[in-house]
Amino acid sequence: MNAAEPTRLDAPQTHARLRVLDANANRAAEGLRVVEEFARFVLEDAFLAERLKQIRHQLAAAVACLPPLERLAARDTPGDVGTRISTPSEHHRPTLDAIVAANLERVEQALRCLEEYAKGFEPSLAMAAETMRYAVYTLAEPLRRSHDARERLRNARLYVLVDGAEDADQMARRVEPLVHAGVDVLQLRDKRLADRELLERARILRRITAGSRTLLIVNDRPDIAALAEADGVHVGQEELSVHDARRVLRPGQWVGVSTHTIEQARAAVMDGADYLGCGPTFPSGTKAFQAFPGLNFLRQVAEEIGLPAFAIGGIDASKVADVVATGMRRIAVSGAVWRTADPASAAARLAGQLASGSRDVLSAHS
């Protein structure tokens, strides 16, 4: 007999298999719905919510091969001994993360049961269950990272890029007022410096930011970020992948990713990025670009992606309102701060504009 053909079973075996398949189809669908609601209402992430919805619909299509009347006839909730078995952990979900973790595990186990009990019985269901199980595994990390990043960057609005200056002392004098002014994130970006100098500058910035609310990110170099004990690294589309950067970083350090299209933003989410840089939005005096995704790209990200995202590229005080109007609440800047007579005051002004803009948007929707 061909291994792909359904096995001929007697009535009791058919009934038993249908009972297991029915229970696990329901369990998987319920768990997927719980996680989908987390993506939809907690993360407010249309992209991840849509991916979960797709799996839920794939599940419904896959189990449609089971005869509906026979499936219902096999269901016996009052006679299910499992309904009388419980553990204390089932009734304890202290955090949103715990709810998601428990339900992802529930979905994975249910899909595995569907796969095993459908083998030789309904081969198409077995193959579909395996495919869905791997899809759920792939979504687990983006869901976890999106929630963690939203919590850690909840109040982060202003991200400032800084170079190594002419020497370490000059850099320290330039940066210290920004930290005191409450800049949320500093990124060290300097292509001129030799590795030892870059590491020295990163360690100085780490000492300056230690104990403050300001996070420290190193551009492109996960090795420098790890040695300096920075909060993370930022990579572009041509640099190391998120996966490879994490192999160099210490546990708990972040990876931010530059994105220029909505497809790149989606890919970064699935790769497990901790935050996004989105742009370039406007022409910049700091860096040359061949194309500008502009405000439309920011709007796409704001509508679809729940992962924290910073608009970047040519943004100054005169353009913050345009950025906020797209739904973006965070910006990354360089020239808007450093090309002023008083960088700390310029940073404080930008932070105030972002806070005011966010309040205005909230008021408009209340």
Image: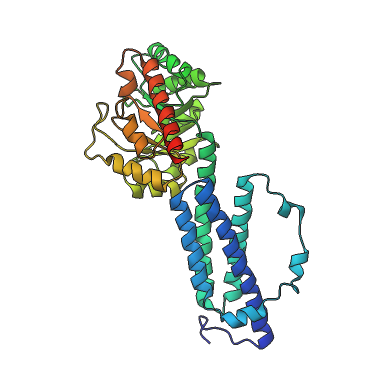
**Color encoding of the figure:** rainbow
x, y (%) of residue 67?
Answer: 56, 81
Q: Residue at x 33, y 19 (%)?
A: 338
Q: Residue at x 42, y 38 (%)?
A: 364
State the image quarter where residue 188 is shown.
top left
Q: Is residue 118 above or below residue 8?
A: above
Left or right of 27? Residue 178 is: left
x, y (%) of residue 227?
Answer: 49, 28
Front in this rendered view, residue 225 or 282: 282
How many callouts does the rendering have? 0
x, y (%) of residue 52?
Answer: 49, 58
Left or right of 45? Residue 220 is: left
Front in this rendered view, residue 246 or 325: 325
x, y (%) of residue 102?
Answer: 64, 53
Q: Is residue 158 visible?
A: no
Front in this rendered view, residue 30 or 3: 30
Q: Is residue 180 visible?
A: yes
Q: Residue at x 43, y 52 (%)?
A: 47
Q: Is residue 113 above or below residue 310?
A: below
Front in this rendered view, residue 336 or 291: 336
Task: Single out the residue that lies furthest toward the left.
Answer: 290
Q: Is residue 152 above or below residue 20?
A: above
